[in-house]
Image (cartoon, rainbow, N blue to C red):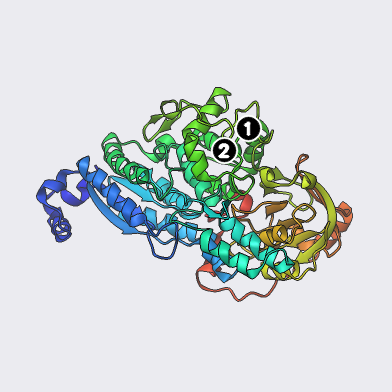
Amino acid sequence: MGSSTLTKGLERAPHRSLLKALGITDREMDRPFIGIATAQSSVVPGHMHLNLIVDAVKRGISLAGGVPFEFGVIGVCDGLAMGHRGMSYSLPSREIVADSIETMALAHDFDALVLIPNCDKIVPGMLMGLCRADIPGIVVSGGPMLKGTVNYEPVDLNTMFEAVGKVASGAMTEEELYELEESACPTCGSCSGMFTANSMNCITEALGVALPGNGTVPAAFSKRLRLATETGFRAVELAKEGLKPSDILTEKAFMNALALDMALGCSTNTALHLPAIAHEVGVEITFEDVDRMSRRVPQICYLRPAGEYHVEDLDAAGGIPAVMQTLADAGLIDTSCLTVSGKVADRLRKPLSTEVIRPVTNPYKPEGGLAALWGSIAPSGAIVKQGAVAPEMMQHRGPARVFDSEEEAVSAILGGRINPGDVVVIRFEGPKGGPGMREMLSPTSAVVGMGLDKTVALITDGRFSGATRGAAIGHVSPEAAEGGPIAYIKEGDEIIIDIPGRKLDLGISPEELAARMAVPVKKPERNVKGYLKRYAEKVSSADKGAVFES
């Protein structure tokens, strides 16, 4: 085992001395050393309770005869970072998390790792680092938040962002807003819908790097602690077996993950994170793969923000094992893929509700939750959560309303300057241009709250929250800062959106577009320094997963 590098031989006496300073006994020197990477903090509601998960994992490791070593990684709360400069750091934080995991795993020669994330970028960041280290590892998250209730109606964080627009339009009072504020986020855990955090945690099950239940068992349930204990136990077994991420994360495993993604109607951010994780194990996932799977796999779950169900409802219906059983019955996943606990076939179960989890013969949508679009605006592609788009907006033509920042767009929307039929264009918000590729939950929620979601579309080279709904098309590539066509859209230009046809076009001639693009792009002045400056210099485009280019 790797830890013998620290514990065996005459020359390792100084190392053993340092270990004994930690309280490690001679008896423990021969046992597997298991690193526990935790994103616990008092900053993020999804992470505030992770100390309890850590304690349960440690118990499992000790019961199995291993030695636990806990260390921390950063975690950005996307909800708290939303709508201001903080969001510029959200996606870039993924690379810091990945670097931290790689560094701690290899610097200390752990025999295995337990990853304890919960929210958004922390899940993929931890998995990217684990893949680089390629030592046995397993994920157990903090679990989803329970939904809130106001007047016997379910509410969540998405409700809050949309309510801001309702107040601005006069459809809601500030007193009603405050009542929502008090109840929308009632417990610890990752926000209660199929937003980015829960999307990624569910996908860990499909990838095979977590035990069944990881994606859906609520944070407030004691079952989550039992799952954490079993995860710790299994980590020691994995260390002894030598089963590595490279053994599990095959191309077929990623196709299973994409199939689950489409069936659940996951966040558009999965189109960034799955390619980034795959990149670390030498597997390529493209927008073409996303769209091909979307054409093949229907959306059989309808969770928030698209529908009214929450992740706790999905858990009660059988969770991810039940969704994957449904897909397996239709021949849409490979059940022979390895996981951290046997094969996919070993962890399937029948759904307990055919409404929360519909059969593929009676889906909510005939295609998957995501779609990729291409055209003169997005030669390298763009992504939309088609499962959350109103039917009347699946095809749309309208005049461009052009903004060079999220703030400008939000001001125009809340100020009543956007009209039915308009297409809001937000550019210079891509990975390089932002920099950081900010989420646009504030403008999309404002559109919904103002009652414009069935008449107004929004396109951007930035990205969207998993809580976004409506005709919101992001990840436009190439981005404006790299001279992509989106940089050359003019106020009033006709934008042509055809989601079923997978098209995103500018209604001008190719000759006119070429003439515009012959002039160097004029970028907005932004005082970027520190990590964001370094990030902008290294990051690839959204269609490549916004990974660091070598």
Alpha carbon distance from label 1 to label 2: 9 Å
Query: Disc 2 designates what residue?
Result: 258
Determine the secondary structure under disc 2. Answer: helix
- In the image: residue 515, left or right of residue 504: right
Looking at the image, residue 228 lies above or below residue 520:
above
- Report if residue 2 is visible in the image: no
> Badge 2: few (under 14), some or many (20 or more) residues near its Cα, within 10 Å?
many
Q: Give the quarter of the image for residue 31.
A: top left
Disc on res. 297: 1
* Residue that appears at 66% across and 68% down: 173
The earlier-in-sequence mark between 1 and 2 is 2
As rendered, which of 167 and 360 lies closer to the eye? 167
Looking at the image, residue 516 lies above or below residue 118:
below
- Residue 531 is situated, as x and y percent measured from the top left of the image, at 50, 68
Asked if disc 1 and disc 2 are in contact, CB closer than 8 Å, the reply is: yes
As rendered, which of 67 and 346 lies closer to the eye? 346
Disc on res. 82: none
Amino acid carrying label 1: it is Val
- Residue 12 is situated, as x and y percent measured from the top left of the image, at 15, 54
* Residue that appears at 62% across and 55% down: 541
